[in-house]
Image (spheres, rainbow, N blue to C red):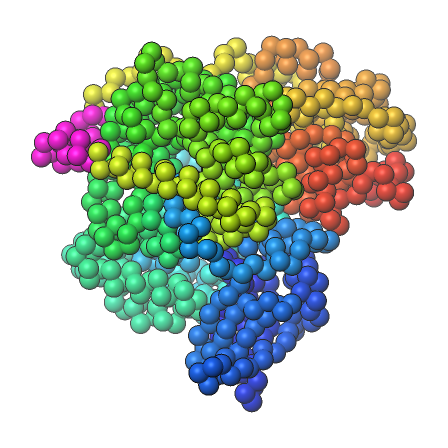
Amino acid sequence: MANFGRFYLDKEKDMIVELSMEEGELHYELRTPNHGTGNLITNLAACCDLPLSFDDAGLKVIRGTVPCYINANNEEVYIFRLKGTKVANIYPDGAVEMKASIPAISKTLMSQTKDYHIDFQKTVVKTYIFKECKFRTDLHTHMNGNLPADVLIALGIHHQIFYPLYYIKKLGLRLSEAQRAELGAARKEAEERLLSEGALEGLVGKYYDRKIDDETGINFARLILENLPDAAYNIPRIRNSLAVMKDGQAVFTNLEKIYLYRYVFTKGHAAADAEWPTGDGPGAGVPARMFPLINQLPDPEIADALLQMEADRQNPAYAHFTLFQNKLLWIARHYQQTGVVYAEISDTSLVKKAQAPYVLRQIHECMPAITRETGVLLRFLAALRRIPLVFGPDARDSLYSLRENLQVLKQVAMDPYVAGSDIVGEEISDVLDLKPLIREIVAIAANDPTYVVRIHAGENDSLRDNVYNSIRCVKEALAPGQAMPHIRIGHGLYTANLSSAKGRQMIADLKESGTVLEFQITSNVRLNNLSSMSKHPLKAYLKEGILCVQGTDGGALYGTDSIDEELSLEKMLDLSKDDLLAMRAAEDRVLKASYAAFDMKSTALKAALNGAEIEAFYTARMEAIEPPAQSPAGRRGKLFAQEALASQIAPLMQGRMPVVVMGGSFNNDKHVTRMLPEGQQLIDYLLEHGDPDKMFFVVGHELKAYEKYLVQHNQGRFAIYMVVPKTLTEKEKERAEASGLKVRVSIETSKMGLYKTYAYEIFRRRPSVVIAMDGNSAASNVIQEAKNGKQAVIYINPHSRVLTAKARTLGGYTRMLDDPEVSGAEILKEVEG
């Protein structure tokens, strides 16, 4: 058979349709090589009523033929259908015209269950949107999550970035013999240098190796183009590292890891041996000797992007673009392809004193030309982290940085490309803790009637008052006579019941304040914040007349874009045309105000500059910043658990099976666990018949309900570990001390981040058993991490509504405690092997 090309059913190139021609008959083979469990292709075959086959490597594939038709112009066209739905027209010259696709949501849910039940119509989606309903903005997205992996790879080659040895090892990339020898020598040099500098002092084991591997690397252009025989193996692995995990829903820990892989490309620097094609100093582009190799790349999309980047070097407007500026150019081009004309991108660099002037200068240099080409206006929300990044035992430095961030924000807020600010990061803290920070932001907004105050809130179900409290915090921070700023809530997925008194008050507050709610359904699903579409509140908000818009949340991370996202919203939530028109009207309102704000602020900045250069102007404003004297930090009086509970901290036992019991500590603030006799009886059985030499228990720090019952009835027989947050109240400290339990201290200060410790210390390292009796999103994250770890046996209490909904998305990977085959004896068999 002769190769006839390929196309993809999804944005991330996970569902590959390989085409081959034999004697005028077109054959296809559908593969999912990036999904190791086989769930995705198995569920797709079942959903589409297609038989499964196996390739020579024993992997599941779907094979068939594509019928040929003659159209009205007497032209041949091959039509690829799934279950009667036209997916693609394939022409004799190899051109492919897509008519339908599989959204990232459907793909994710198919990949993590052995029992997929979503309708075919919501799985294979026709890619058509009414013109009058088409969304034209991306009002919720993040700087380093926007670009597809193929464009990032092309940028890495074009700018000849330094690619660390750590990532080469982590991804298992293949090297040529010459590259292997080169990196081996470079690593020895790096180790000797770091030893002489004292940079390795105190580091041992993996930390010692990681430091050296981070300092050792290769020119990315050479890694790919000088090793083309291995490019077909290496590129898919690099591509997969730049998107959230494939075989199921991820959690925030996975997102944090993906950003580190992306930073290599989005914040990278040129390799020391970069050979600039201009010959007169730094400038992007591949060396002339490598240029002919571009067309030999196995991925034509990467080759096409790279050739366009090389062509851009001949354009005076783009010839000297930095990596950051090229990133903005390609973000705008990507938006242009999907019909987006305006986007607001959250970026933390705009609140950093050392970076903001340089970043703003680059934006002002490149954006006029980018907008002229693409018709896309990019503006930015200066992003503050809701939880400062703290790597040491003391948070004071990070709190100082946050104070400085606010001072920088005050100085850059006047810029026309700065639309306002955002509070970003995993929503594991109460918005009330951010009240002093919000007060400072609202004070900055007092000087700019166009200022956007965005707060990430309502993303998970553990803090259902966060949306309500976000609006109240802004309202209470207003100075006398100050108008309400433009409030936007990112996500707004979980709140008090909209029919309750608090829910009705929130609706009234949303209307009165003109707050805009931003929805991005794909990231909600892929980050394990949404398992059941039936509970999504968007239609209810639209019915109430609340302003609602769409975002992508950094769509490339989640395998989506503006079009895919709108189709997912429409199909998954059964939105009507009127619903979509209401969202388009809300978007148009924001768009009109944003264009007007940009024009007004551009005029004001030009007058303020008075001929000065942008970077010099903002540098002078940064130098005028005085060290802030007062912290905007939230509630005080927290104790560091590492010190407060030092005598109880102990490593997890080796050679014994950890049994994680959840049933009290993982609830949201409004949910109280009601213990049932059968749950108590199960714990009694495990305590009576289990072997303390073969197992130990792990519980949350609140010791409520089933966890408290376990501790009270243990009578010292089993070792029990309590996982506690990094910081504690005095009451929490006293409770932990009184329990006498062994302690593990989390890396997170919030109880809702404890799931990360379960993942790092248990699920990713050893087999375990999880008994999930009750809980909200924090418990769902523990369950998802347990499933992703691949070594846990998970039992779910069927009386917990939230956890049962989670179990439905993990068909075949969880066991219900009311199953006749599940008993205390069966659980102990799993524990004791």
> Looking at the rendering, which quadrant does residue 776 occupy?
top right
Between 255 and 124, the residue placed more toward the observer is 124
- Can residue 27 be seen from the camera position used here? no
Q: Is residue 397 left or right of residue 734?
A: left
What quarter of the picture does the C terminus occupy? top right
**Residue at (43%, 80%) from the top-left corner?**
93
Between 556 and 213, the residue placed more toward the observer is 556
Q: In the image, is residue 613 part of the stretch drawn in magenta?
A: yes
> Looking at the rendering, which quadrant does residue 73 occupy?
bottom left
| 821, above or below 512, in the image | below
* Range shown magenta: 601-622
Q: Residue furthest left?
A: 611
Q: How many marks?
A: 0
Majority secondary structure of magenta residues: helix
Between 742 and 283, the residue placed more toward the observer is 283
Q: Is residue 53 left or right of residue 377?
A: right
Point out residue 102 in the picture as x, y percentages from the top left corner.
Answer: 56, 58
**Residue at (69%, 40%) from the top-left corner?**
806
**Residue at (89%, 44%) from the top-left corner?**
821
Q: Is residue 549 left or right of residue 157?
A: right
| 647, above or below 720, in the image | above
| 205, above or below 309, in the image | above
Point out residue 162 in the picture as x, y percentages from the top left corner.
Answer: 35, 51
**Residue at (32%, 23%) from the top-left corner?**
445
Q: In the image, is residue 786 part of the stretch drawn in magenta?
A: no
What quarter of the picture does the N terminus occupy? bottom right
Point out residue 781 in the picture as x, y percentages from the top left corner.
Answer: 63, 36
